[in-house]
Amino acid sequence: MKFLFISPRYSGGIGGHAAMLAHQLENFGHSVTKMETPHIPIKNLKNPSFAILGALKGIMNRQNYDIVHAFNIPSGFAMHYSKGQKKILSAHGVYSDQVKVLHSSTTSKIATSAESRVFKWADKLTTDSQITKKEYKKKFNLDLEYLPSPIDTEMFKKIPEVKKITNQVAYVGRDSFEKGIDILKSIESKINGNVVYCVDKPWDETMKILKSSRLLVVPSRMESLPTVIKEAFYLKIPVIASSVGGIPELVTHNETGILTESENPQLLLKNINELLIDESLQQKLSSNAYDFVIKHFTWKKILPKYLNFYENLLKN
């Protein structure tokens, strides 16, 4: 099969998933072109500029593809104008809800309008979380295919063995409002340990820091299905995370991690300090979480589902 993948970038959450999927498909002998589109790196212009320039790039691209797969709503414009037998749009979280939290009411209205329009351009819609599937069914009466985003366990072979650092707490994610980094910083001085923020570090360096930590904190206000939680599970690092979005699909309280209320810094502080001194619970959570991610979120488990999905789509 000949694929065109469209994503604002090919690292981090959505982009990292697109890059890993492309790599797996190429290993199976398929051809994957990753569209690279520039955009204006300014808050209110980033997505609109990416959508416009992506659409122009799609119009100018004379190549024909079996499948054009766009990995977020702004990518849908390039998807629409690219030549493909079948077109897929993936949603990672509810886009209009995310924009509503982060931008003005005018921008939010534009995003909601664009969202409903872009969905109509795709032959199939997918998502990596059950909560996103449920929310879009409720919001637009849309049926999205659930296709989880796994981790590539082979990539972890290049992460060296490291010594655990006493009471080190890791944060991995963007420095942005929806990720709740400000919530963690507001209690940092009261944490009985040292917080290391991995915001713009390379993946290898981030994983090395995570591996040396006692626990990972995910204080998000909004999420789909965070890759970093799956990575922490694989590295056997206990996780404390907000009970938002698709996180409860990964973190079962007191079994694979600790769930805490979003925007409740005092409860988050209590959970962090209690887990830091409870080595027995740390071991229980990390062991259960490792078993969970190996069972459900590796490419060995998930790639056949993608291949069947693509093949069946081309047949119809």
Image (cartoon, grey):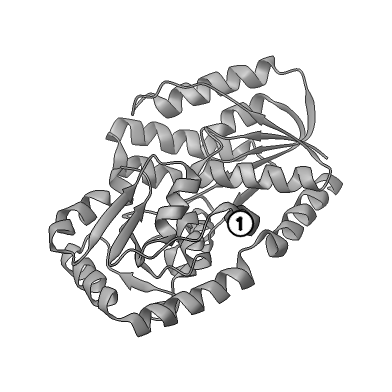
Compared across the picture, whether 14 is left or right of 22 comes to left
Crowding around mark 1 (Cα neighbors within 10 Å: few <14, some 14 to 19, many 20+) is: few
Identify the residue at horizontal 23%, vertical 59% (top origin).
194
| Quarter of the image with the N terminus in it | top right
Residue 243 in sight here: no
Is 218 situated above or below 291? Answer: above
Identify the residue at horizontal 64%, vertical 31% (top origin).
79
Q: Quadrant of residue 163?
A: bottom left
Residue 125 image position (x, y, % from top left):
63, 48
Label 1 SS: helix
In the rendered image, which residue does mark 1 sit on?
157
Identify the residue at horizontal 54%, vertical 41% (top origin).
15
Q: Which residue is farthest right?
A: 315
Is 81 situated above or below 105? Answer: above
Q: Quadrant of residue 99?
A: top left
Residue 231 image position (x, y, % from top left):
50, 60
Is 222 situated above or below 109? Answer: below
Q: Which residue is farthest top?
A: 60
Residue 210 image position (x, y, % from top left):
41, 58
Compared across the picture, whether 10 is left or right of 96 comes to right
Residue 128 in sight here: yes
Q: Which residue is farthest left?
A: 190
Residue 301 image position (x, y, % from top left):
70, 65
The residue type indicated by label 1 comes to Lys
Q: How many marks?
A: 1
Compared across the picture, whether 314 is left or right of 219 comes to right
